[in-house]
Image (cartoon, rainbow, N blue to C red):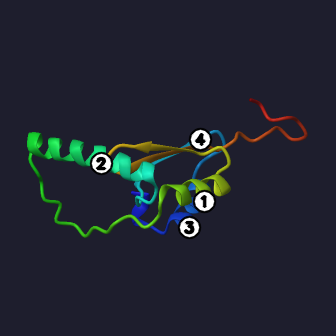
Amino acid sequence: SIHHLPFEPALGRLATLVRPGGSLASVGLYRARTVMDYLTAAVAFLVANFLRWRRGLTPVHAPTRDPASPLGEIRTAAGAMLPGARIERRLLFRYALSWTRPPRSPAGGPRRP
């Protein structure tokens, strides 16, 4: 989803739509760059081919493009824009992003945990 858009502007816009105390969740694709990325990709290749063999292949017939950003850049940008955001590596070249907007604090009072 988010990997089809310019990452930082899209993430910034999505963050403005989250109410205080609300959550943002997204799954995206990242570009392999590190040794760990390529090791995960090797496992993903095996899993993807097993699933293709087991379930068959359904053509998408939609425009696609390779992901532009490596996971490290995604983590850095998300961390700067959304303090406390979590990025978790997933199988099949994906990551999961989750963030909860802090609740508003009462006027003059501390934030609730």
Q: Secondary structure at mark 2?
A: helix
First in sequence: mark 4 vs mark 3? 3
Q: Where does label 2 land, which residue?
A: 42
The image quadrant of residue 112 is top right
- Whether residue 16 is situated above or below residue 6 in the rendered picture: above
Q: Residues within 10 Å of mark 1 (few under 14, many from 20)?
A: some
Amino acid beneath label 2:
Ala
Name the residue at 40% across, 43% down.
Answer: 90
Q: Where does label 1 land, which residue?
A: 77
Q: CA distance from mark 4 to mark 3?
A: 20 Å
Name the residue at 56% across, 65% down.
Answer: 8
Amino acid beneath label 3:
Pro
Check contact, mark 3 vs mark 1: CB within 8 A: no
Name the residue at 47% across, 60% down.
Answer: 70
Check contact, mark 1 vs mark 4: CB within 8 A: no
Q: Where does label 3 land, which residue?
A: 9
Q: Is residue 86 left or right of residue 27?
A: right
Q: CA distance from mark 1 to mark 4?
A: 20 Å
Label 1 or label 4, whichever lies nearer to me, is 1
Q: CA distance from mark 4 to mark 2?
A: 36 Å
Q: Where does label 4 land, which residue?
A: 22
**x and y, in percent, of residue 94 in the image:** 38, 49
> In which quadrant will I find the N terminus?
bottom left
Q: CA distance from mark 2 to mark 3?
A: 31 Å
- Residue furthest to the right in view is 108
Label 1 or label 2, whichever lies nearer to me, is 2
Q: Secondary structure at mark 3?
A: helix
Q: Is residue 41 left or right of residue 107?
A: left
Check contact, mark 4 vs mark 2: CB within 8 A: no
- Residue furthest to the front in view is 35
